[in-house]
Image (cartoon, rainbow, N blue to C red):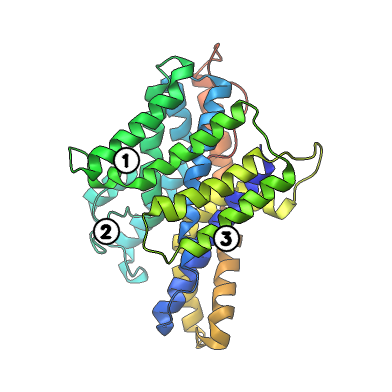
Amino acid sequence: MIIQIQYLRGIAALMVVLFHAFDLLGRETGMDNPFRVGALGVDIFFVISGFIIFVAAEKSEPRPAEFMIRRILRIVPLYWALTLLIAGVSLLRPDLLSSTVFDPKHLLASLFFVPMAHPKLGELFPVLIPGWTLNYEMAFYLVMAAALFAPRGARAWIILAVLLLLVGLGQAGIAIPAFYAQPILLEFGLGLLIGMAYRRNLRIDAGAGMIVTLVGFVALVWLEPVELSRFLKAGLPAALIVGGAALGRRAPGRAGHPLMLLLGDASYSLYLTQAIVLPAMAKVWSSTGLLPGLAGGLPFVAVLTAVAALAGIVCYRLLEKPLLGFTTRLSARSSPAAPGGFQGKQPKGASLS
């Protein structure tokens, strides 16, 4: 585990939570969202994912089927549980939800990571809206799994070529679904490049790494309002953020900050559950008669963010972690250890996992 990357996972998840909390405040008060940069926490996640998945695969040399099974067992159980929870509520108590309606076809597409227009919102969102990023994650996993058939030295270049080809053909309007032609897909490639440097033991001083990460955050904030491709204004700064954290040397034996490590561990749960917790808490707040815009809306945003963070940690402890333990034991029994296969503990640190 790279402690700095764990920190970034927690920070990226909180960025997304804050963005949505301010968004809810805006819906109630008409205020503009002052933290639109929070939405770009997703880009940090994608770069982290490209880095961690590549490094983990290089270390463990999994077979392609093993790799996909492990990723599915890591990502799917919690996502399906929360998706089915929302679908059940939309079927039994639709009055409790403002943007979700029960649609069997849409539910099936959501469960199997197929981009499909949301029946109410019209966008390519699944039932559990943050799951749109998982559709990209699964696409990247498929490319990674296919590359595992190739010789080790060629894999990274094959993955990069496929990602570039998908985006290039899609942007040219040639036979690629528009969802998978977005430059955001290339952010996995940026993480992969950082992973290649990491595997070659390229390192920079801890102080220099911190400076690179801070420069990345400054660029992210500075470029967010600029009319540029998301890859340029978010992907490249995210690569600086992750690259500085991953390649910066760290003093051996130095303990990490417990709360930040916990938020990193719980980032997947936090990222998914905030889509349920934040709207629910906004309704609770409204029922109290308190004005959301009180004191500039900061109490509203602070309370919603704190409750979402706590709910994410609880979900991680009570649901995600037990599910992960169960699926890890299940896969260990069904896939005997073999040379080149995954063995031992599941690597930590996938971007949304």
* Residue that appears at 40% across and 16% down: 150
Q: Are marks 3 and 2 in contact (CB under 8 Å)?
A: no
Q: Give the distance between the C-alpha atoms of the residues marked 1 and 2, in whole angstroms.
A: 17 Å
Mark 3–mark 1 Cα distance, whole angstroms, equals 37 Å
Q: Which residue is mark 1?
A: 112
Q: Position of residue 153 (x, y in %)?
A: 48, 18
Most extreme residue toward the top is: 339
Mark 3: few/some/many CA within 10 Å (<14, 14-19, 20+)? few
**Three-letter residue code for mark 3:** Val
Inspect the image, locate mark 1, and give the three-letter code of the amino acid beneath it: Phe
Query: Which kind of residue does numbered mark 2 sit on?
Result: Glu
Q: CA distance from mark 3 to mark 2?
A: 30 Å
**Residue 180 x/y as whole percent:** 29, 43
Residue 215 relative to residue 64: left or right: right
Res. 123 mark: 2
* Disc assigned to residue 263: none
- Tell me if I can see residue 313 in this picture: no
* x 37%, y 58%: residue: 228
Q: Earlier in the sequence, mark 1 or mark 2?
A: 1
Report which residue position mark 3 lands on: 218
Q: Position of residue 232 (x, y in %)?
A: 42, 52
**Residue 317 versus residue 344: which sits nearer the camera?**
344
Q: Is residue 353 above or below residue 118?
A: above
